[in-house]
Image: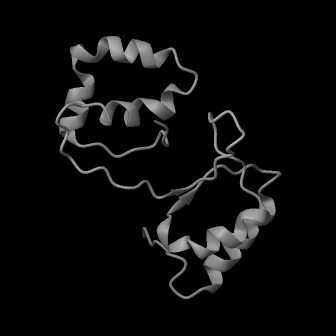
């Protein structure tokens, strides 16, 4: 299994994961190069009789089928059309870099600022 390393967990799942009975699993997963990305999905998908709901992560990510599978592709302006076509499904996107993604980020920022309802402004005053 693979997933983002950012998750929201229920108290019951945290208690289960923190239990001493999972130490052999934690040691085994800890030896993997992508431990931070596979720990939670591997754990959750293998808990006997697990009945809690697992919701979709709201991350737009592209995986290279020919890649190593350890990290998503760097998003560039070439991904813009697909991102905009699915923008109502995602809150975040990954993976961007300062150099390769600059044009993509500028376009996303511009669209968010000009589209009605496309940009949420928070007032913390």
Q: In which quarter of the image is residue 15?
A: top left
Q: In this view, does 110 lie to the left or right of 25?
A: right
Is residue 97 positioned above or below 38 on the image? below
Q: Is residue 8 left or right of residue 124?
A: left
- Here the colouring is one colour
Is residue 96 positioned above or below 91 on the image? above
**Which residue is outermost to the right?**
99
Q: What's the residue at 46%, 58% (across, down)? A: 58
Q: What's the residue at 50%, 25% (across, down)? A: 35
The one nearer the camera, 1 or 15, is 1
Q: The C terminus is located in which quarter?
A: bottom left
Is residue 116 positioned above or below 12 on the image? below
- Location of residue 21 in the rendering, given as x and y in whole percent from the top left corner: 22, 14
- Location of residue 56 in the rendering, given as x and y in whole percent from the top left corner: 39, 55
Q: In which quarter of the image is residue 119?
A: bottom right
Q: What's the residue at 70%, 73% (across, down)? A: 81
**Which residue is outermost to the bottom?**
116
Q: In this view, does 56 lie to the left or right of 48?
A: right
**Which residue is outermost to the front?**
66
Q: Is residue 86 left or right of residue 54?
A: right
Q: Quadrant of residue 13?
A: top left
- Location of residue 116 in the rendering, given as x and y in whole percent from the top left corner: 55, 88
- Location of residue 86 in the rendering, given as x and y in whole percent from the top left corner: 56, 71
């Amino acid at each position: 299994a693979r997933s983002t390393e950012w998750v929201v967990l229920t108290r019951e799942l945290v208690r289960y994961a923190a239990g001493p009975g999972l130490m052999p699993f934690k040691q085994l997963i800890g030896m993997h190069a992508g431990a931070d990305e596979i720990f939670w999905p591997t754990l959750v998908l293998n808990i006997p009789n697990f009945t809690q709901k697992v919701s979709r992560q709201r991350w737009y990510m592209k995986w290279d089928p020919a890649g190593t599978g350890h990290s998503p592709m760097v998003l560039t302006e070439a991904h813009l059309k697909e991102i905009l076509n699915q923008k109502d499904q995602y809150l975040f996107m990954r993976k961007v870099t300062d150099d390769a993604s600059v044009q993509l980020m500028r376009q996303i920022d511009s669209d968010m600022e000009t589209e009605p309802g496309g940009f949420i402004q928070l007032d913390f005053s």
